[in-house]
Amino acid sequence: MSAAPDPTPHDREADWILVADVGGTNARFALVDGHGVAPVLQQPRALRNADYASLQHAAEHYLQLTGARPRRAAIAVASPVGHDEIRLTNRAWSFNRSELRSGLGVEALVLVNDFGAVARAVPALGDDDRVHLHGPVEALRQGPVSVLGPGTGLGVGLLVGSASKGWEVVETEGGHGSFAPLDAEEEAIARWLVARYGRASNERLLCGEGLACIDAVLRGEPPTREAVSRKPADVVALALDGHDTEARRALARFCAVLGSVAGDIALVQGARCVAIAGGMVPRFLPFLRASAFRERFLDKGRFSVYLEALAIQVVTHPYPGLLGAAMSMQDTGWG
């Protein structure tokens, strides 16, 4: 399910809904017409969080660009959303639920966890919006489905139910589980993370900054804030180019750890399918397929046979969080 071409909000009467997917690095926005049977993303746009003082300022800028005046908003944020006061995990943004609703001038505001939104979107994705990675090739008909993905952090969600009876999302903070190193190199990486951050979690490792940290460890950089870290995008580019040994080792280690963590999450959640989303993985899919990801995913002793029966898919839709936010609003009723 792809985004629609840019509309002009004044072409006709529309019940515009503002949808947003707010991570640690970017805030993505789009409009959805509440008169539609199913959500179709209109005018999607990504804004850099660093350019705005708050989520409200970023949203207001987007609405100025589009000229739309939505009555409702559905916003996915990278943090727990169970309280009135929301604080993003990987961005120094915080807001009050009712104050944001008032500031945006909307009648209704739905807040969901970002990977809860991604999980909500997974059953709606078409064949062009996902790539089969490993395991059985079959349609998504029955949960549980583990949804995870590295980006600014490591998002984890759970999808339960079925295509016939309906789907339900369980929002989680599973990315913050402790990292379990499996060899000497990973033990060195864990010590480096503890020295720098005080704790080695899966999220610290399986994210853009985590890839840069792995690269720094392999290049012998100390765990100080002054260490010379290469940008994650540069590490990926150098690894794919094939001439930088440390970059290739770093990305290979990243893929291996991702396999281990994905296998752990699948076991904990009793998954029948694993969907990997987020902004990083689609950039190096062939590398991931050729890496130790699959080997480490299955390396669970007596339960390797159980994991062999699971399908693993990679979400390639550019805006699954926006689509899931829109579907979360749809779940409350369009009217």
Image: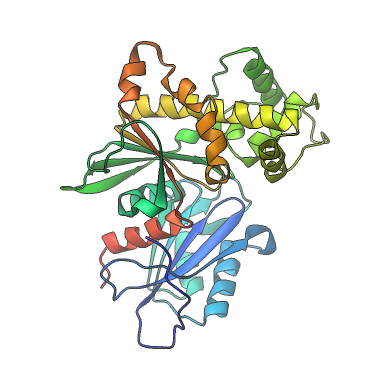
- Residue lying furthest left in this view? 164
Q: Determine the image quadrant of residue 314.
A: top left
Q: Quadrant of residue 264?
A: top left
Q: Residue at x 34, y 23 (%)?
A: 308
Where 271 falls versus 114 (above or below)? Answer: above
Q: Is residue 210 visible?
A: yes
- Residue 150 lies left or right of residue 17; in this view the side is right
Residue 216 drawn at (x, y percent): 75, 30
Which residue is at a point 68% across and 45% down the rendered structure image?
233
Measured as percent of width and height from the top left, residue 56 is found at 56, 67
Res. 190 image quadrant:
top right
Mark yes or no: residue 155 visible: no
Screen quadrant of the N terminus: bottom left
Instruction: Residue 62: give x, y in percent of width and height.
Output: 56, 72
Q: Nearer the viewer, residue 171 or 106?
A: 171
Image coords of residue 108 (percent x, y): 37, 69
- Pick the residue in front: 174 or 284: 284
Q: Is residue 145 above or below residue 34?
A: above
From the viewer's side, name the closer residue of 29 and 242. Answer: 242
- Which quarter of the rendering shows the C terminus? bottom left
The answer to whether 13 is drawn above or below residue 81 in the figure is below
Q: How is the image coloured?
A: rainbow
The answer to whether 229 appears left or right of 315 in the picture is: right
In percent of the image, x 55 and y 49: which residue is there? 88
